[in-house]
Image (tube, coloured by chain):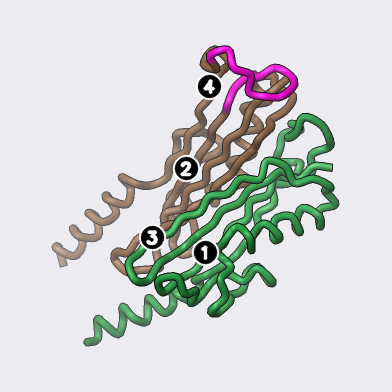
Chain colours: A green, B brown
Amino acid sequence: MKKIMFLLSVAAFGLLFAGCASVEVVPNKNLNSEKISLSGAPIAHLNAQNWGIYLFSIPLLTGSTDSPGSIAVVTDTVNAESMIPVITAKSKELTATQTLDLASQYSDFGFIFYCRSINISGNSVK
Amino acid sequence: MKKKIAFMFAMAGVALLFAGCSSLQTADSSKFNGQKITASGTGVAHISGSASGLYLLWIPLIVGSTENPNSIVFSEDSCNVTAVTDMVTKKSKELNAAKTIDLVSAKHSTNIPFPFPYIFYWRTVTVSGNAVN
């Protein structure tokens, strides 16, 4: 019984970190003065990620796309439709006029309860 | 007590088997079968870099080094898109390419369910790009 309680509390602690959206910006200085497009000035390489826990297709805990870093409840945000605005908004914030080479990977695994994740990358260019 | 220590060592051994790895692969123009890899300019190489490592929550334990591919570092967070992109663009520059186009990155994190779920994570980052002149 004690062991089950301990495992449950560890899992609950882990769930504190569940469902999170983030955008990582690779600034120009980490591009080793390489251009990242055929024309235009490089601004940054962007990588956006989101994941969440689903009961079949019902979203339980997901990363919020409105405020990256926080958790959304019963909101389906782990999809390209929700994440493309996140990465393009970041690109715009960095004063880029183009977000090139957008690429996405989507995966899910589990049984009854599923963990879904999406990864999108793009290149900000002016 | 002895059994417990042996178990801990065995666990650490298993962790080390999977722990920290990084690689940098390059396919030069001789592998392109005469195909262009860019709409304009000359294709130099396709470069693929990756780093993976073992994390305790967000704390890096054993991670692949992006400074020295194929080696490991301890407690250094090099398993991120910034470090791997740096490694890829550095290689591109080394090959005398002026541009690294079509940069694509992917980041994955998997929870290792033992000894306790949601505590240990295996993180992988992959970045690829085309070195062009």
Q: Residue B88's spot in the image, x, y percent?
A: 61, 33
Task: Identify the magenta region.
Answer: B33-46
Gap between marks 2 and 3 measured at Cα: 26 Å
Front residue of A113 and B23: A113
Residue sitting at x 66%, y 32%: B89
Asked whether residue A16 is in view, the answer is no
Q: Which mark is residue A109?
A: 3
Residue sitting at x 26%, y 82%: A4
Residue sitting at x 32%, y 67%: A111
Q: Is residue B34 magenta?
A: yes
Q: Amino acid at mark 3?
A: Phe
Q: Amino acid at mark 4?
A: Ala
Same chain check for tags 2 and 1: no
Q: Amino acid at mark 1?
A: Trp
Gap between marks 4 and 1 measured at Cα: 33 Å
Q: Which residue is mark 4?
A: B27
Gap between marks 4 and 3 measured at Cα: 32 Å
At numbered mark 2, what does the secondary structure look like: helix, strand or loop?
Answer: strand
The N terminus of chain A - image quarter: bottom left
Mark 1 Cα shell of 10 Å, populated few (<14), some (14-19), many (≥20): many
